[in-house]
Image: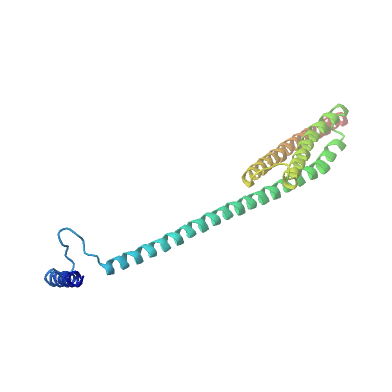
Amino acid sequence: MKITKKKTVRNSTLILILSLTLALYLPGRATAQGMPVYDNTNFISMTKSLVESAKQTSELLKTVQFLKEQKDNIVKVNNAIKQLKALQELTRNNETLFRSVQTDLRHILNSPYIKAGEVERVSRSFEQIMDTAIDDLDFVNQILSSDLLKMTDAERTAILMEKKRRSQEMVAELEVKTRRYREIISFRKMQDIINNRETEY
């Protein structure tokens, strides 16, 4: 039993001496018969680099997410501004339409140079424009006030822009009609003056 213990101690001592001898004769970072020598400094440095890269990647992802949110916010604000401008233009155009009907139509219908049979036709042409304008305003009001119509901001903006374009067309159409009837009145008035002058001579 004592002999076995002595043998074990002697073998351990021999292995230790051989290991130290090899360590002294081999270069610092060499390999022994293809086996890599463990380098603790490089491992720690690599681990630190990986941790730093992970932090940078995480920060980069946060930045990307932040920029995406800001872009979405900008799109929402732009849509809101477009909607506001479209509504302002729509309101202005409808005010022009109502004012034109109140003043120009009354002036045209009160003219003695518009014949009785023309009054209904003139009134109807103006009323059609006004009916369309009122329907459009009612539809816009539903879009803006009702949650039943599920729409995105972009869809709502597109509809408002279309209604704004139509209101511009209606204003232009009303102006053309008004100008045409005024020209008719002016022509008939001049014709009347010429005819009366001829009878005076």
The quadrant of the picture occupied by the N terminus is bottom left
Quarter-of-image position of residue 159: top right
Lateral position of residue 116 relative to residue 40, left or right: right
Q: How many marks?
A: 0
Residue 157 appears in view: yes
**x, y (%) of residue 118?**
84, 28
The spot of residue 175 in percent (x, y) is: 73, 39
Residue 158 lies left or right of residue 22; in this view the side is right
Kindly indicate the quadrant of the structure image that contains residue 40: bottom left
Q: Is residue 90 left or right of residue 199?
A: left
Q: Is residue 1 above or below residue 97?
A: below
Residue at figure coordinates x 27%, y 67% from the top left:
42
Q: Residue at x 39, y 64 (%)?
A: 51
> Is residue 185 in view from this perspective?
no
Quadrant (top left/top right/bottom left/bottom right) for the C terminus: top right
Q: How is the image coloured?
A: rainbow
Image: 33 above or below 196: below
Where is residue 90 drawn, in percent x and y?
A: 71, 46
Question: Which residue occupies the extreme top position in the image?
Answer: 117
Whether 87 is drawn above or below 33: the answer is above
Work out whether residue 78 or residue 130 is closer to the camera in this orientation and state it.
78
Quadrant of the rendered image containing residue 31: bottom left
56 w.r.t. 193: above or below: below
In depth, the one of 90 and 197 nearer the eye is 90
Q: Nearer the viewer, residue 151 or 140?
A: 151
**Residue furthest front as drawn:** 1
Residue 186 position within the rendered picture, expressed as x and y whole percent measured from the top left: 78, 36
